[in-house]
Image (spheres, rainbow, N blue to C red):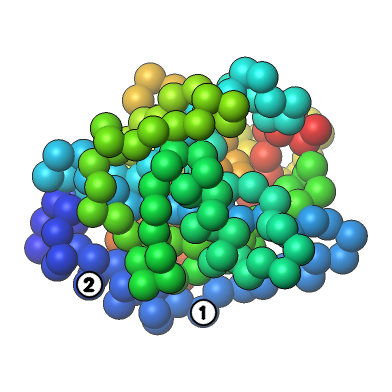
Amino acid sequence: MDLFRHNDELRGHLQQHLAAFRRHEIPRDRRRPATVAVTVCRDESRAAIIVTRRSASLRAHSRQWALPGGRRDPGETAVMAGLRELHEEVGLQAGSGDVMGVLDDYATRSGYVITPVVVWSDCDWRDLRPNPEEVDIVRPFRFKDLARKDSPILQTIEESDRQVLSMHFQDDAIYAPTGAMLYQFREVALFGRQTRVAHFEQPTFAWR
Protein backbone atom coordinates (compact mmCIF):
# COMPACT_ATOMS: atom_id res chain seq x y z
CA MET A 1 0.00 0.00 0.00
CA ASP A 2 0.97 3.64 -0.42
CA LEU A 3 1.90 4.81 3.09
CA PHE A 4 1.98 8.42 1.98
CA ARG A 5 -1.54 8.72 0.50
CA HIS A 6 -4.40 10.00 2.69
CA ASN A 7 -7.21 7.44 2.38
CA ASP A 8 -9.22 4.88 4.33
CA GLU A 9 -6.61 2.18 3.70
CA LEU A 10 -3.96 4.30 5.42
CA ARG A 11 -6.30 5.00 8.33
CA GLY A 12 -6.86 1.28 8.86
CA HIS A 13 -3.12 0.63 8.67
CA LEU A 14 -2.37 3.26 11.32
CA GLN A 15 -5.18 2.11 13.61
CA GLN A 16 -4.05 -1.51 13.44
CA HIS A 17 -0.53 -0.60 14.55
CA LEU A 18 -1.71 1.77 17.27
CA ALA A 19 -4.12 -0.83 18.64
CA ALA A 20 -1.23 -3.29 19.00
CA PHE A 21 0.95 -0.74 20.80
CA ARG A 22 1.18 -0.93 24.59
CA ARG A 23 2.01 2.55 25.71
CA HIS A 24 4.10 3.52 28.72
CA GLU A 25 2.73 5.93 31.29
CA ILE A 26 5.01 8.13 33.42
CA PRO A 27 4.17 8.91 37.06
CA ARG A 28 3.21 12.54 37.31
CA ASP A 29 4.81 13.22 40.71
CA ARG A 30 4.93 17.04 40.91
CA ARG A 31 4.76 17.53 37.17
CA ARG A 32 1.69 18.94 35.43
CA PRO A 33 -0.32 16.91 32.90
CA ALA A 34 -0.44 18.11 29.29
CA THR A 35 -1.64 16.68 25.99
CA VAL A 36 -0.74 17.16 22.33
CA ALA A 37 -2.72 16.09 19.28
CA VAL A 38 -0.69 14.20 16.67
CA THR A 39 -3.19 14.89 13.90
CA VAL A 40 -3.16 13.23 10.49
CA CYS A 41 -4.57 15.58 7.86
CA ARG A 42 -4.51 15.96 4.07
CA ASP A 43 -1.98 17.82 1.97
CA GLU A 44 -4.13 17.56 -1.14
CA SER A 45 -4.12 13.76 -1.67
CA ARG A 46 -1.11 13.10 0.56
CA ALA A 47 -0.98 12.41 4.29
CA ALA A 48 0.67 14.83 6.72
CA ILE A 49 0.83 15.73 10.40
CA ILE A 50 -0.33 19.17 11.54
CA VAL A 51 2.63 21.13 12.92
CA THR A 52 2.47 24.67 14.31
CA ARG A 53 5.00 27.34 15.14
CA ARG A 54 4.15 28.85 18.47
CA SER A 55 3.33 32.54 18.63
CA ALA A 56 6.16 34.98 19.35
CA SER A 57 3.99 36.55 22.06
CA LEU A 58 3.87 33.41 24.22
CA ARG A 59 5.95 33.51 27.40
CA ALA A 60 7.16 29.92 27.16
CA HIS A 61 8.67 28.19 24.12
CA SER A 62 7.76 31.00 21.73
CA ARG A 63 8.54 30.49 18.02
CA GLN A 64 9.24 26.78 18.54
CA TRP A 65 7.73 24.08 16.35
CA ALA A 66 5.03 22.19 18.22
CA LEU A 67 1.98 19.98 17.96
CA PRO A 68 -1.40 21.49 18.92
CA GLY A 69 -1.74 21.00 22.65
CA GLY A 70 -1.29 22.34 26.14
CA ARG A 71 -2.02 21.91 29.79
CA ARG A 72 -5.01 19.80 30.81
CA ASP A 73 -7.88 21.51 32.57
CA PRO A 74 -9.12 20.01 35.87
CA GLY A 75 -11.20 16.90 35.21
CA GLU A 76 -10.09 16.50 31.60
CA THR A 77 -8.81 13.26 30.17
CA ALA A 78 -5.90 13.28 27.74
CA VAL A 79 -8.29 12.75 24.82
CA MET A 80 -10.61 15.55 25.91
CA ALA A 81 -7.71 17.97 26.28
CA GLY A 82 -6.16 17.03 22.95
CA LEU A 83 -9.41 17.56 21.05
CA ARG A 84 -10.06 20.87 22.85
CA GLU A 85 -6.56 22.19 22.12
CA LEU A 86 -6.83 21.13 18.49
CA HIS A 87 -9.97 23.21 18.12
CA GLU A 88 -8.64 26.19 20.10
CA GLU A 89 -5.30 26.40 18.31
CA VAL A 90 -6.07 25.60 14.67
CA GLY A 91 -9.89 25.59 14.47
CA LEU A 92 -10.21 21.86 13.77
CA GLN A 93 -13.28 20.20 15.27
CA ALA A 94 -12.73 16.48 15.92
CA GLY A 95 -14.52 13.96 18.12
CA SER A 96 -13.64 10.91 20.15
CA GLY A 97 -14.40 8.71 17.12
CA ASP A 98 -11.51 10.37 15.30
CA VAL A 99 -8.98 9.30 17.95
CA MET A 100 -6.88 6.38 16.69
CA GLY A 101 -4.69 5.78 19.72
CA VAL A 102 -2.32 7.17 22.34
CA LEU A 103 1.49 7.11 22.36
CA ASP A 104 3.94 7.05 25.28
CA ASP A 105 4.04 9.80 27.88
CA TYR A 106 7.04 12.13 27.68
CA ALA A 107 8.34 14.04 30.72
CA THR A 108 9.74 17.47 29.90
CA ARG A 109 12.47 19.47 31.59
CA SER A 110 9.97 22.31 32.04
CA GLY A 111 7.80 20.26 34.41
CA TYR A 112 5.13 18.53 32.32
CA VAL A 113 4.14 14.99 31.49
CA ILE A 114 2.85 15.13 27.92
CA THR A 115 0.46 12.51 26.52
CA PRO A 116 0.31 12.37 22.69
CA VAL A 117 -3.16 11.57 21.32
CA VAL A 118 -3.29 10.45 17.67
CA VAL A 119 -6.20 11.92 15.69
CA TRP A 120 -7.43 11.32 12.13
CA SER A 121 -8.91 14.17 10.09
CA ASP A 122 -10.10 14.46 6.50
CA CYS A 123 -9.38 18.20 6.42
CA ASP A 124 -6.69 19.78 4.27
CA TRP A 125 -4.16 21.73 6.33
CA ARG A 126 -4.76 24.80 4.14
CA ASP A 127 -8.31 25.04 5.52
CA LEU A 128 -7.15 25.37 9.14
CA ARG A 129 -7.59 28.68 10.94
CA PRO A 130 -4.78 29.18 13.48
CA ASN A 131 -5.48 31.21 16.60
CA PRO A 132 -3.01 34.15 16.36
CA GLU A 133 -2.72 34.36 20.14
CA GLU A 134 -1.12 30.91 20.21
CA VAL A 135 0.01 30.03 16.69
CA ASP A 136 2.03 31.99 14.13
CA ILE A 137 1.77 29.48 11.28
CA VAL A 138 0.56 25.98 10.47
CA ARG A 139 2.57 23.65 8.28
CA PRO A 140 2.19 20.03 7.07
CA PHE A 141 4.80 17.47 8.08
CA ARG A 142 4.29 15.16 5.13
CA PHE A 143 4.53 11.41 5.74
CA LYS A 144 7.07 11.21 2.91
CA ASP A 145 9.35 13.60 4.82
CA LEU A 146 8.58 11.96 8.16
CA ALA A 147 9.94 8.69 6.77
CA ARG A 148 13.28 10.18 5.68
CA LYS A 149 16.16 7.82 6.42
CA ASP A 150 18.34 10.68 7.71
CA SER A 151 15.90 11.33 10.59
CA PRO A 152 16.10 11.27 13.52
CA ILE A 153 19.23 13.27 14.24
CA LEU A 154 20.95 12.43 17.52
CA GLN A 155 23.31 14.90 19.18
CA THR A 156 25.44 14.83 22.32
CA ILE A 157 25.46 17.80 24.69
CA GLU A 158 27.67 18.57 27.69
CA GLU A 159 24.69 19.22 29.96
CA SER A 160 23.26 15.69 29.78
CA ASP A 161 24.28 12.06 29.39
CA ARG A 162 21.28 11.51 27.11
CA GLN A 163 21.24 12.24 23.38
CA VAL A 164 19.14 15.09 22.01
CA LEU A 165 16.72 13.97 19.28
CA SER A 166 15.46 16.06 16.38
CA MET A 167 13.71 15.43 13.07
CA HIS A 168 14.45 17.10 9.73
CA PHE A 169 11.57 19.41 8.79
CA GLN A 170 11.68 21.36 5.54
CA ASP A 171 14.78 23.59 5.91
CA ASP A 172 14.69 23.36 9.72
CA ALA A 173 14.63 20.76 12.51
CA ILE A 174 12.03 19.89 15.13
CA TYR A 175 13.54 18.95 18.49
CA ALA A 176 12.27 16.80 21.33
CA PRO A 177 9.78 16.68 22.91
CA THR A 178 7.84 17.36 19.68
CA GLY A 179 10.47 15.68 17.53
CA ALA A 180 10.50 12.62 19.78
CA MET A 181 6.72 12.23 19.55
CA LEU A 182 6.78 12.61 15.76
CA TYR A 183 9.50 9.98 15.58
CA GLN A 184 7.52 7.57 17.76
CA PHE A 185 4.41 8.13 15.64
CA ARG A 186 6.42 7.24 12.55
CA GLU A 187 7.90 4.13 14.11
CA VAL A 188 4.74 2.83 15.79
CA ALA A 189 1.87 3.91 13.52
CA LEU A 190 3.55 3.87 10.12
CA PHE A 191 6.00 1.00 10.54
CA GLY A 192 4.58 -1.07 13.42
CA ARG A 193 7.76 -0.91 15.52
CA GLN A 194 7.62 -0.88 19.31
CA THR A 195 9.96 2.12 19.58
CA ARG A 196 10.34 4.10 22.83
CA VAL A 197 11.42 7.74 22.99
CA ALA A 198 11.03 8.95 26.59
CA HIS A 199 14.77 8.53 27.18
CA PHE A 200 15.75 11.09 24.55
CA GLU A 201 16.89 14.50 25.74
CA GLN A 202 15.62 17.95 24.81
CA PRO A 203 17.87 20.83 23.74
CA THR A 204 18.78 23.23 26.51
CA PHE A 205 16.63 26.03 25.05
CA ALA A 206 13.57 23.86 25.80
CA TRP A 207 14.47 23.28 29.45
CA ARG A 208 12.87 26.52 30.64
Q: How many other residues sit within 10 Å of disc 1, few (<14), some (14-19) or many (≥20)?
A: few
Q: Are marks 2 and 1 in contact (CB under 8 Å)?
A: no
Q: Residue at the far right: name it.
A: 30
Compare residues 162 and 60 and report the one nearer the observer: 60
Pointer 1 residue? 22
Quadrant hosting residue 2 = bottom left
Which image quadrant: the N terminus?
A: bottom left
Q: Residues within 10 Å of mark 2 (few under 14, many from 20)?
A: few
Residue 154 seen in this snapshot: no
Residue type at mark 2 is: Gly
In the drawing, does residue 137 fall left or right of residue 113?
Answer: left
Residue ID at (25%, 47%): 123
The part of the image, by quadrant, that contains residue 177 is: top right
Q: Earlier in the sequence, mark 2 or mark 1?
A: 2
For image coordinates 14% across by 51% down, the residue present is 5
Residue that badge 2 annotates? 12
Foreground residue, 52 or 18?
52
How far across and down, in percent of the image, does residue 6 sit?
17, 53
Mark 1: amino acid = Arg
SS class, disc 1: loop
Which of the labelled discs sits on residue 140, or is there none? none
Relative placement, left or right, of 72 versus 10 is right
Residue 192 location, x and y as percent?
34, 69
